[in-house]
Amino acid sequence: MPRKASGALKTGITRERQKNGDVYIYERKTKYDPIRKYSVTISKTLIGKIVKNTEEMVETRPKRRVIDPMIIEVDATPEISRRHVGMLDIVNHVSEKSGVSAEVNRAAGSDKGIVRKILTLVWYDFATDGETWPGLVPWTTKYAGLLPYRESPISQDMYHDLFVYLGRNESIKQSVFRHRAEMMGDGELLALDSTTIFTESENLNVGRSAPHKDKLIKNVYKVVEIYSITSRQPVAYARIPGNISDGTTVENALKQLDVLECPKVEIVADSGYSAESNMTMMIRNGYPFIMHVPTDTKWIQPLIEEHRDRLMNGGEIIHCDPKFSGITVMQMHDFAYERQRANKKSGLEKGETEVLSRRVYVHIYFSSMKKAEEDIKFRMQFDAVKTDILSDAYLSSEDQKFAEQYMNISYWGERITGVEVNTKAYKKRCRYHGFVVLVAQKEKDTNTALEKYRSREYVEEDFKNSKSYTGGNHPRVWDDDTLDGQMLVQFLAQSMHESFATMLRSLRDSLAIPNGDIEHDTSDKLKEEKQLKNWIRKTSMHNILSWFDAIEETRVSGKKAWRTERTKRDKLFVEKLGIRARG
């Protein structure tokens, strides 16, 4: 049985294109007619128009009413609205302070409609902590009138078309990268990181079949990111087909830095980039580096053995981490590479090997506490694998390799009768437990080298966030252009994320500290700041935004407005961040 018509008056928005190319926007009220069995128009009111070749709606001039002096008008019912404003006050503040708003305006300022759509998508990705894009439609509906793009909620077709536009318009992305490069100073520390992303889309040419982390053949691509440790901001990224090694991505990153005309920066990299070919590439391109090198590197082990006793019995105490002692050794090392073109000066032909003899500084550190931790970790791994072998459990490829290297397994026929440690291999491995080696092309100081490398560790969490902002593990996009546009929006959202994290760290470190101001240094003021400090320390950024999302504003007739009550802590937080609430 069909549902009975409610007879309710429904309001919608319609568009009508005029002969001159303008589009008129009408508010149309309809009601279902049970006799005619279709909806009829009750009223249609012109509310604005979109001029030809633009995307922004402008209000049309209202018709002047003819007032009849014989008619006594009754006051109309005041217009009343309620909207969420607390969270968006913070989001807008972060967008301005991070420079994202200015960057988008600079890159795409000729089209204000595109600028507002980009910023709205960036705000959504930041405020929702990287929620999927279909959630954008109800989100822009909920915050209608408060977002950069105010004309209407952003539908799936609208944000898909925007992604395609951004993916095909490379100049917008490169404008953002170049501006960030221009903001860097000489000696700035840069970190490199990459992640392999598995895609389920069959339309991505960038996806290549390759072994993934679980050793299964999947359709994957790689994202390489350049990150400024000094400013705690992402600088640029690149998308690379397939699952190539981390070391191979260095060449791509260095070319990108050259194109962006970066100043004299110093690159800090972990052991994933420690191949000599990468060091050679950085030396040839004039980029000083600090590289974490594995202790089993052939030309490093003799240096560890030479200074082993001195390090284990004292050495220079490292101020940034007193658990470590350290020593620096200057070493002349030969870096060989294959020439890509002939060199008349040296007489070498294309394809021949050229050797660059360069001075590097090898910083060797030792910690007895780190050695104890690594010894215990090894023994626990040994016991776990031994238990699996004796119980005939399934072994992963990593465990099988571990067993082959460090275990002597006894058999009676096909039955395993015993598992013992391979003493020689065990001693060789444990001999270098507790040691950390850094190779620097420029930095001579033992303390400073470790401080610079440790500063990279601070951004590891940021790299994890960037991995979630670059498509996740299962991106579902139509094509390469859509993916490129989506990645740019997520890159800008990540920038807002890092800026907000920096604001919160700075605010947290400044709270509950006497500053000599009599009005500030009272017990009540310091107590309030301590409560706010503890709240910031224990609350994630996403939960902070969700907390303020409960704050609403009620407005009557567009003039008078009031907000839901905020606690002292909320007011102090907003005041300390310097956020100015919307009018």
Image (cartoon, rainbow, N blue to C red):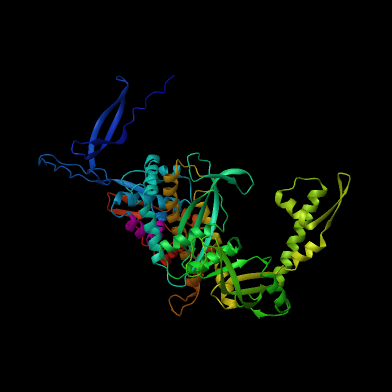
Residue displayed at 52% across by 69% down: 283
Q: Nearer the viewer, residue 348 or 60?
A: 348
Examine the residues drawn in magenta and state their main secondary structure.
Answer: helix
> From the viewer's perspective, is 269 left or right of 146?
right
Q: Position of residue 140 (x, y in %)?
A: 39, 46
Tell me if I can see residue 567 in this picture. no
Q: In which quarter of the image is the C terminus?
A: bottom left
Q: Position of residue 131 (x, y in %)?
A: 48, 47
Residue at the extreme right of the image, as rendered? 412
> From the viewer's perspective, is 229 left or right of 300?
left
- Report the span colored magenta: 90-107
* Magenta stretch holds residue 106: yes
Q: Hey, which quadrant is residue 446 in on the image?
A: bottom right
Q: Quadrant of the N terminus?
A: top left
Q: Position of residue 500 (x, y in %)?
A: 46, 61
Q: In this view, does 240 lie above or below 45?
A: below
Total marks in image: 0
Residue displayed at 50% across by 40% down: 201
Tell me if I can see residue 150 in this picture. yes
Q: Position of residue 62 (x, y in %)?
A: 18, 43
Q: Hey, which quadrant is residue 443 in on the image?
A: bottom right
Q: Nearer the viewer, residue 30 or 469?
A: 469
Q: In this view, does 476 lie above or below 439?
A: above
* Magenta stretch holds residue 143: no
Q: Nearer the viewer, residue 465 or 61?
A: 465
Q: Is residue 404 above or below residue 233?
A: above
Q: Is residue 42 above or below residue 550?
A: above
